[in-house]
Image (cartoon, coloured by chain):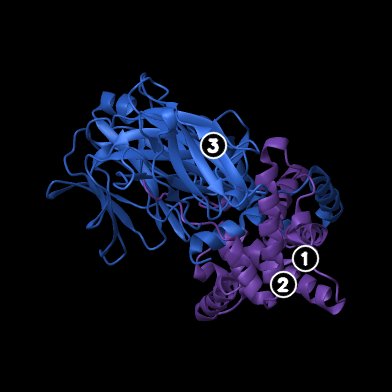
Amino acid sequence: MVGGSSQAEMRGATPGREDLDALAERALRLALKTAVAVVGSRDAAADVAQEVAIDAVGSVHRLRDPAAFDAWVHRITVRHAVRAIRRERARRLAEIPLARLRPADEPVAADIERHAERIDAREALARALARLPARQRLALALRYVHDLPDTAVAEALGCRVGTAHSLLSRGRAALRGDGELADLAPAPTGEAR
Amino acid sequence: MSGERDIVALFGSAREAEPTEAELAAVAARVGKCRRGVRSAGRSLVLVLVGLVAAATAAAAATGLVPLGQVIGGGFDGTPVRERIVASGELPGTGPWRMTTFASGRGGVECLKLTLLGRASPAGPRSAGYCGGTVAFTELALGRRRAAVARGEAILFGSAPGRARSVELRGRHRVVATVPTAGAGPRRYWALAGPAGLADAEIAWRDGDGRIGGRLDVGHRFGRPERRREVLRGAAPGGRRWTLTAYEGRRKRIGNDVYEPEGLPCLLVEIDPPPARSAAVGGFCGVQPATPGFTRAQRRIGGPRRLLLLYGHAPAAARHVQIEGTEGERSTAARRALDGSPGRFWGVALPYAAARGATVRWVGSGGRRGRRVQVLPW
C-alpha cells in the first residue's frame, strides 16, 4: 500500500524509467494474484496482469489520490479479468487446472506428498470457481487473495457494498456446497492441546 | 469445508502467485514503449507514488518497520521464504513488534511469526511463531522462560476473528492489559504482555460493541513450566516424522469447558511436516480402565500412502504391541521412554487398509497378553 504524503513536494519533477517500472511491477504483482484465482490458466492470468500493468502506467495521470493506487489497480484488474473470462467462455475452452498455474513449482522430494495434495486442492478450486459467475469469482478473489473488506471489494467491482456482500455470500455458499472441495478442506487444527 | 479459514486456504496458491523474471521483463519493455504516453500532468503523481514506495522501503531498512502488506524475506529455519507483514504495534516494556504470515518452506503450510524490533534481551529470542494452520483465536507465548521472565513479563500473540477489535488479558478478577487488534480482513492479529506469574490468566477478544466473542485459558503460559518429556520418536513411510511427548495434565479450559483436566497422564503427538488435511498436533489425557497401563490413540497422517498413526502407552511388562487386521498380523516394539523415565510407549504408522477394523493389544514375555482394543474409524 502506498499513501500518506504530500503530492505538492514532488511536483515539477520528471518521472524516470525506473519510476514507471516500479509502478508497473507493483500493478503486475497485484493483478497477477487476482487473475490467477479467476482465469483458467497461468498464461491467461499473466496476460491479464500484463495488460493491467500497462494500462495502469499508461493512465496513471488519471489517478488523483496516490493512496488509492492499489484500489485503482484492482478496478483495472476487474475490467480485464471479466473480459478474459468472457473470451474464455466464448471460445468454449476447457478449463486448465490451477495445477499448471505455477510452472516453476516443482516439488522437492521431501514435499512430494504435500505437493500432490496441494495440486488436488488447486484443481478442485479451479473447477469450482469456473462454475461461478465472473463477478462472484472476482469478489471472492479480492476478499481471499487480497483480504479486502466489503467496501473495497465493492469499489473494485464498481457496485454497492450490499451487492458486493451478496456476491461474496453467494460465492462462499457455492464453494461450501461444492462436494469436491468439501472432501479437500483441511480439518480444524489445535485440538487436544 | 465449513469456515472462512478453509476458503482462505483454498486461495493460498493465488496469494502466493508471483510474476516470473520473463513476465517482469516483458512489462518493463512495454512500459518503455508507452512511457512517452504518460502526460506531464501525471508525472508528479508517478513520482509521489514511487517516492512513497521508496521512502517506505528506506524507513524499513532503517527501523525494521515496513508497511502492512509488504513482502519481505524471512522464515524460521533458514529456508528462505517470503513473509507478508500483517500487523505491527508496540508493547510498553518490549518495544515495537511486527507480525508476518508466510507459507513454510517445507510444504507450504501457513505460518504466523512475531518479531520484536526493539532492543533485544540478551537472553531472549527476537522472534517466535508456529506453522500448521491458524485457528480463529490463538495464543502463543514468546520465550516465556528466557526473554519474558528476564523482563518480568510474558508476551502472548496470535490471531483473532475479523470481528475482533481488542484482546484483553485478565488475571484473577481484573483486566491486566487490553490491546487493539491489528490488520484487516477476515483475520486480525494481536500481541500483548503480562506479568510473569499472573494467576488464573485468561485472554478474551471483544468486538466493536464491546461484546466478548471468545475466551481462552492461558494460565499455563504464566505458571510453572510443565514437566514435559519427549518419550518416543519415529518415522512414517514417506518421510514424515512423529514425536510423542508425555506430560501431566494442567487444568486448561476454553470458557467454561475444561479441555485438559488436572493431573492426568497426557500424551501429545506431533507430526512433522504437518499432514495436509489433519492437525499436526494432537493427543489425549487419561487412561483406558479396561486395559490398565495400555492406551491406544490414533491420528491420520494421510498422504499418497494413506497412513494412520497408532500410538499410546504400554505397561512395563509389554515387549510388543500386536496389530491384527484384515491384512494379517503385525507388531511393533513397546519401547522405553527416551529419557529413561518409567513407562513404555509405542507407535506405528499403518496404511489405511491394514488399520481398518484392526485390533491392538500388548504382548509381554512368557505369553502374557493384554485385552484387544479396537482401532476406531477415522
Would you call the spot at circle 2 few (<14 residues within 10 Å), some (14-19), or many (20 or more)? some
Left/right of residue B176 with respect to residue B155 in the rendered view: left
| Horizontal and vertical percent position of residue B5 | 50, 59
Residue pictured at 70% horizontal, 42% vertical: A112
Of badges 2 and 3, nearer the viewer stands: 3
Residue B83 appears anywhere in the view: no
Tell which circle, 2 or 1, labels the residue nearer the N-terminal end: 1
> Marks 2/1: CA distance?
8 Å
Amino acid at circle 1: Gly
> Marks 2/3: CA distance?
48 Å
Residue B32 appears anywhere in the view: yes
Amino acid at circle 2: Ala
Tag 1 secondary structure = loop
| Horizontal and vertical percent position of residue A137 | 65, 71
Quadrant into which the C terminus of chain A falls? top left
Tag 2 secondary structure = helix
Q: Judge by depth and name the residue closer to the eye, A72 or B9.
A: B9
In the rendered image, which residue does mark 3 sit on? B331
| Corner quadrant of residue A134 | bottom right
Q: Does A38 appear above or below A110? A: below
Colour of chain B, in one word, is blue
In the rendered image, which residue does mark 2 sit on? A130
Query: Are callouts 2 and 3 both on one chain?
Result: no
Left/right of residue B11 with respect to residue B213 in the rendered view: right
Q: Chain of mark 3?
A: B
* Label 2 close to label 1 by CB (< 8 Å): yes
Amino acid at circle 3: Ser
Q: Chain of mark 1?
A: A
| Horizontal and vertical percent position of residue A147 | 54, 60
Colour of chain A, in one word, is purple
Residue pictured at 80% horizontal, 43% vertical: B21
